[in-house]
Image: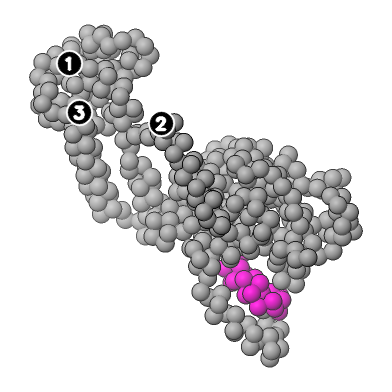
């Protein structure tokens, strides 16, 4: 018998082999349709606690008589000289080789001229390539070792464990933006959520590739803001060309500096499948360390359901992607308007209460001067040219509140310096 047949024979004879392999053994290991059915009935009976009765399992198959003959053939020809692990390794290798061949054939057959469709196909193939179902579960000793290594790292390194945000108090709360986290940045319209997120992205892009997907602004508008941040020239002046000689010279000086930033801007895609596909591709090819998406309510989805259900599913998919790629994903979101009490609250996350559930961190931006409020309730300090940044949820970091300066002509947030 060939390898996959020997593997099926061994697990039929010894349930410990299947149970000890976790979820690694699946019906994809067995190309024969009857073998798949025998395996699946075996698995269902075993996991339901019904024990393994090979006659009963055969009787549950579509072709019971043939299944019984097949089971008899398998268990009568077991080769115990083969190790189970070597059989698993070799069978899985053959499956991978078969899938790669399928991919090559499919790529030759694709007649689509739309590169986005081709990219989506490649992304789906990569996402579903490893169907072995391997689940890695560490012992508590391994988990404790991991935590103690982190403790030692934090003791001996003054730097952050995550990506530097550029805001000292936000760094203190989060210890930097952490891989695997979905971070929601939310505010009402015109509060500056795009500017705040771009501040974070531009800072991170000084050292690492960062991917920005903008569903609302053009890449030139984003770049104009970045030039304004560094040159301290009004972004409106930059976009309209109303620059004096000194400003022009200053702009050219900082243009070279901004050009070195590792930020990648996508101003074309607003469909969730394309966005996820591009994130996967740039993570593999460009090594992106962080993603910013502006913003959630402008992302389109072909999933059925109302807007709230679609938004909830998009948030969950992006959370799963952040965890899979081990990078932080910043997702901007609108807040529902509340004229009576405009102060940001988790209940006001627009279109879905499930956004909060998916998020690891929720950050609100509050600029009360836009509502003609002269003093912050928090400490009765002035609101002029200032913003309150509220970390309303921190699954692993905790919550906190701090103030920043907001420079209106530059649309830029900066640390308050006293």
Find numbered disc 1 in the image and state the secondary structure of the residue it sits on.
helix
Where does residue 331 sit, x and y in percent of width and height?
60, 51
Q: Secondary structure under badge 3? A: helix
Residue 164 at x, y percent in the picture:
58, 59
User: Could you tell me residue 296's position as x and y percent?
Assistant: 61, 50
Quadrant of the image for the C terminus? bottom right
Q: From the image, tell me which residue sits under label 3.
A: 84
Q: Which mark is residue 71?
A: 1
The residue depicted at 35 percent of the width and 34 percent of the height is 133
- Structural distance between the alpha carbons of marks 2 and 3: 23 Å
Q: Which residues are magenta?
A: 213-237
Decide which of tag 1 and tag 2 comes sooner along the chain: 1
Q: Which mark is residue 139?
A: 2
Quick one: label 1, few (<14), some, or many (20+) residues within 10 Å?
many
Residue 268 shows in the view: no
Residue 225 position in % (x across, y down): 65, 70
From the image, state whether disc 2 or disc 3 is nearer to you: 2
Q: Earlier in the sequence, mark 2 or mark 3?
A: 3
Q: CA distance from mark 1 to mark 3?
A: 19 Å
């Amino acid at each position: 018998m060939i390898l996959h047949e020997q593997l099926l024979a061994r697990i039929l004879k010894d349930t410990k082999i299947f149970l000890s392999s976790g979820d690694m053994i699946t019906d994809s290991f067995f190309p024969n349709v009857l073998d798949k059915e025998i395996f699946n009935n075996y698995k269902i009976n075993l996991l339901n606690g019904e024990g393994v009765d090979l006659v009963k399992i055969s009787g549950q198959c579509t072709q019971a008589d043939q299944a019984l003959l097949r089971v008899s053939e398998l268990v009568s020809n077991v080769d115990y000289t083969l190790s189970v692990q070597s059989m698993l390794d070799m069978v899985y290798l053959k499956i991978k080789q078969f899938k790669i061949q399928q991919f090559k054939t499919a790529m030759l057959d694709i007649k689509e001229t739309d590169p986005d469709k081709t990219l989506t196909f490649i992304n789906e193939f990569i996402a579903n390539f490893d169907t072995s179902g391997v689940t890695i579960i560490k012992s508590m000793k391994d988990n404790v070792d991991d935590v103690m290594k982190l403790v030692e790292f934090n003791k001996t390194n003054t730097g952050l464990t995550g990506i530097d945000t550029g805001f000292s108090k936000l760094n203190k709360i989060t210890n930097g933006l952490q891989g695997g986290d979905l971070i929601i940045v939310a505010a009402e319209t015109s509060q500056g959520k795009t500017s705040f997120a771009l501040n974070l992205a531009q800072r991170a892009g000084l050292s690492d590739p960062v991917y920005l997907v903008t569903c609302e602004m053009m890449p030139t508008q984003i770049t104009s803001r970045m030039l304004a941040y560094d040159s301290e020239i009004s972004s409106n002046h930059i976009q309209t060309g109303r620059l004096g000689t000194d400003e022009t010279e200053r702009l050219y000086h900082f243009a070279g500096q901004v050009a070195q930033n590792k930020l990648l801007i996508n101003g074309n895609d607003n469909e969730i499948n394309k966005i996820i596909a591009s994130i996967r591709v740039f993570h593999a090819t460009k090594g992106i360390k962080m993603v910013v998406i502006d913003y959630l309510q402008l992302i389109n989805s072909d999933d059925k359901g109302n807007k709230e259900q679609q938004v909830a599913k998009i948030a969950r998919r992006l959370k799963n992607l952040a965890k899979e790629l081990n990078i932080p994903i910043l997702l901007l979101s609108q807040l529902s308007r509340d004229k009576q009490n405009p102060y940001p609250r988790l209940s006001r996350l627009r279109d879905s209460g499930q956004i909060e559930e998916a998020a690891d961190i929720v950050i609100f931006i509050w600029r009360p001067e836009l509502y003609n409020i002269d003093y912050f309730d928090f400490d009765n300090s002035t609101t002029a040219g200032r913003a309150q940044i509220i970390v309303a949820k921190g699954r692993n970091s905790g919550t906190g509140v701090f103030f920043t300066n907001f420079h209106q002509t530059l649309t830029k947030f900066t640390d308050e310096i006293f």
